[in-house]
Image (tube, rainbow, N blue to C red):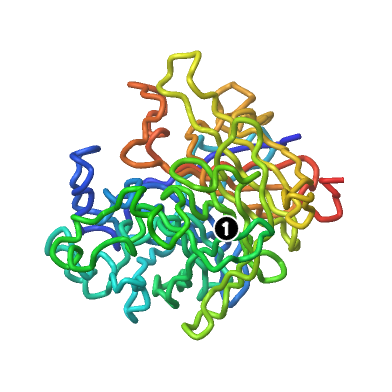
Amino acid sequence: SVICTWTENYVAVPDELQGHTSGTYINGMGGAPFDYVPSVGFSDIEPAYNDNEMTHGEYFCLSDNGYGSSVNSADYALNIIRMKIQKPFTYRHGESTFETYTETENLNTAILHDPHGYIKWENGADIQTAYKVPDATWSDWQELRVLTGRDFDVEGLAAVNENLAIVGDELMPAIFAVNPTTGVVLSPFVRTPDIDAKGKFNGKFLSTRGDKVHCDVSVLEANADDCMAVDSETVEASEYRRHDPSGGYEGFSLLADGSIAAFVEKKSGDSSLGDEPGTRVYKVNPGDGTPANPPSFESFRGFYPLELNNGNIADVSAIPGSSNLVAVVERNGFPSGHMWPAPVQPYNVLCVVDLDDLDDDMVMQNKKCILNYHRVSDPWDVDGNGIFRYAQTQVTNEQLIVVDDYCVIAGTDTNFPWTNQFGIDSAPYLQEVTDTRFMVVCFQEPVFNLAFDLLD
């Protein structure tokens, strides 16, 4: 059972992202172009560190790729924000109450950049800022070799410490090492290996329409906007295994043994993986943050089975102290507007799964779902609205972290500027449809303690 829930918001644009033109590819949506790089929501959340120790209440939050795809995000600077996320709560001791929403605090903004020139594609292609920037406001970022949403669609983050994190991308998909505090790229990217029927690496790699390896370098040099993506037939005819450009590492988490559980988001869409029994999960070695020892794929762990009607992994977080148990958020879409019956009923559900317990088809078979994001008990009426149930109605829930034996933080990716997913014109808290939101949910029992035996 759930004992409490509350929400926080993040709306600010940090100084580091001011004074640079962005949004030139989205046809005026939301008032674009902007003279700043907006907060578009976060695609992953990880613990933040000081001196290799986790810092209570502070988290690394990974920006999404910008405006949704490789074709419209070439002027979005990828970034990691160190965020303070805490909320006062007293179980109404002395009938004390607090504000409905508490703004989170940005402690540091790290813009991802590649000063050492590690990021290059096999065909010789370079990052977007080597070819084209929107205007002179990007001259400093061009010199820094700032990464953009045309280069990578960053969805997964696994923080080892304050100086090393592994980023999971979905435009190839691939992984690479960064310093989450400074934003400096620490290694070349490493592609995702394909597997055979027995789950062994077969010498091929996954690729998508947004993968720059399919572009003619001379075209990029002449005008990079002429190869923002290719067609599916080009990928299919290549040496790579075709996958969907929005199907990479949504689930990405460091385990107690030092390895990373890397969940491919889905098997649907423009993908050749559709006949597989679940979404792929890989075992990743994070390396040590040097180009000589980059992150690497150790093995294929198995297939994760989604709940009925669900099609996507939203995020993954390790159960503290475990090397085989993780919490997984799934989703299936959202209503088209606010007139019901709706085409899709949101079903964002939190489950726990054993990565090592596989059936004969390599499908993870020990799994238990414990929370529906649209059916959260709020017995203390933390948001003060007189309703004792809460729903995280921003349905692009792409952040999850288990913070202790009892609690999780769940956060959103707003898809700015397409934030008003229900198409409402007015509401008492209309800002809620725009902000990145964080929800803290605590269980009455220590369900994430390994001695609790949740899956038994």
Residue 421 figure quarter? top left
Q: Residues within 10 Å of mark 1 (few under 14, many from 20)?
A: many
In this rendering, the count of numbered labels is 1
Q: Nearer the viewer, residue 293 or 302?
A: 302
Using the image, determine if residue 456 lies above or below residue 295. Answer: above
Is residue 233 rendered to the left or right of residue 48? left
Instruction: Tell me the quadrant of the picture where the C terminus can be found.
Output: top right
Q: Amino acid at mark 1?
A: Phe
From the top left corner, tell me how far across and down residue 199 is, in percent.
66, 60
Is residue 119 rendered to the left or right of residue 320? left
Q: Secondary structure at mark 1?
A: strand
From the top left corner, tell me how far across and down residue 423 is, in percent.
36, 24
Residue position for label 1 = 252
From the top left corner, tell me how far across and down residue 177 is, in percent.
48, 72
Residue 313 figure quarter? top right
Residue at 49% x, 53% y is 248
Using the image, determine if residue 131 lies above or below residue 22. Answer: below
Residue at 67% x, 37% y is 4
Q: Nearer the viewer, residue 339 or 305?
A: 305
